[in-house]
Image: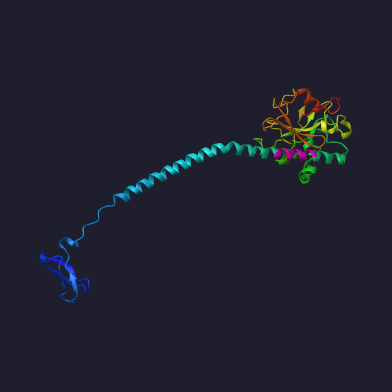
Amino acid sequence: MPISFNCPHCGTSTQVADQYAGQSGPCKSCGNTIQIPLAGGYQGKSAPAPNRSSSSTGTIIIVVALIAVIGAVTVGGVLVALLLPAVQAAREAARRAQCSNNLKQVALAMHNYHDTYKSFPPAYTVDADGNKLHSWRTLLLPFLEQAALYDQIDLDKPWDAPENQHIVDTVISTYTCPSSPNQMMPYTNYMVIVGPGAVFEGAQPIAIRDITDGTSNTILVVEVEGQQVPWMEPTDLSLEQMQMAINGGLTEPGSNHPGGFQSALADGSIRFIAATIDPNLLRNLITRNDGQPIQSF
């Protein structure tokens, strides 16, 4: 069977008998020496066998890589699970610090109000018939850098009168604890305690001179939780209704911070009061003039 091939030098197509396969000779066109290929196109060399070793190695590498990825994901998940409580604790610590700062601003505003009017603000203002109009929180606005908002309020009309409706839904961040689930609502997380012997006795303002038990031993403002009371509303805790049970309901102090609640004392300092405080000690801290000695708390 003739063998067809092209000269590698001049490209001339040539056919020779298969008996000359593998032999060398001059090209009939250019004279250069050429080698006649073997029948079937092979040059006397066998085709390379597949490299089974390389294929196996690649498979092993892929398996090892997959195991490494799975291990990394598993370890990462365990690390996240271990770190999550620490992250949550850090976030709560930051929220508690901001809550403490809010109370500090409120206490400072109370003292600036006292410097101006020679008394702390009343728990609420009233009209000629004794009906409640506005909360102490409204009266403190000029001392919390909210004078522009305060000037828009008609103090001669109730807090929820039509003339004041454009203010009712305003959120005052200073009156909202960042741990509260309602922090984006116009509610307050800070209230005073109103009743005979407390720093707030209703519409009658109280001065520092009336705190005979000492300002560092008397509660000024407390934290509350779950009240959903608008900050403009003249509603606070009633001393006569309190059972002295921390987080005990809508009549008691409480918070979303674990272990107790934060409070501002009449001297402007901020104290965290543990939920385990003795009820009698808490009552002594609330009253300003009972003459009872205060233990450490």
Q: Identify the residue at horizontal 71%, vertical 34% (top origin).
A: 189
Quadrant location of the C terminus in the rendered image: top right
Q: Is residue 71 left or right of residue 14?
A: right
Q: Report if residue 189 is visible in the image.
A: yes
Residue 16, given in percent of the width and then of the height, sits at 12, 68
Q: Is residue 29 left or right of residue 80?
A: left
Residue at the bottom extreme, as displayed: 30
In this picture, is 137 found above or below 247?
below
Q: Is residue 13 above or below residue 206?
A: below
Rendered-image quadrant of the N terminus:
bottom left
Q: Is residue 63 magenta?
A: no
Q: Residue at x 79, y 38 (%)?
A: 107
Closest to the observer, 112 or 38: 38
In the rendered image, residue 183, in percent from the top left (x then y), is placed at 67, 38
Q: Quadrant of residue 7?
A: bottom left
Image: magenta residue range: 97-107
- Please name whichever residue, 10 or 110, is drawn nearer the observer in this view of the structure: 10
Q: Is residue 172 visible?
A: no
Looking at the image, which is closer to me, 119 or 87?
A: 87
Say whether residue 153 is left or right of residue 77. right
User: In x, y percent, where is residue 268?
Assistant: 80, 37
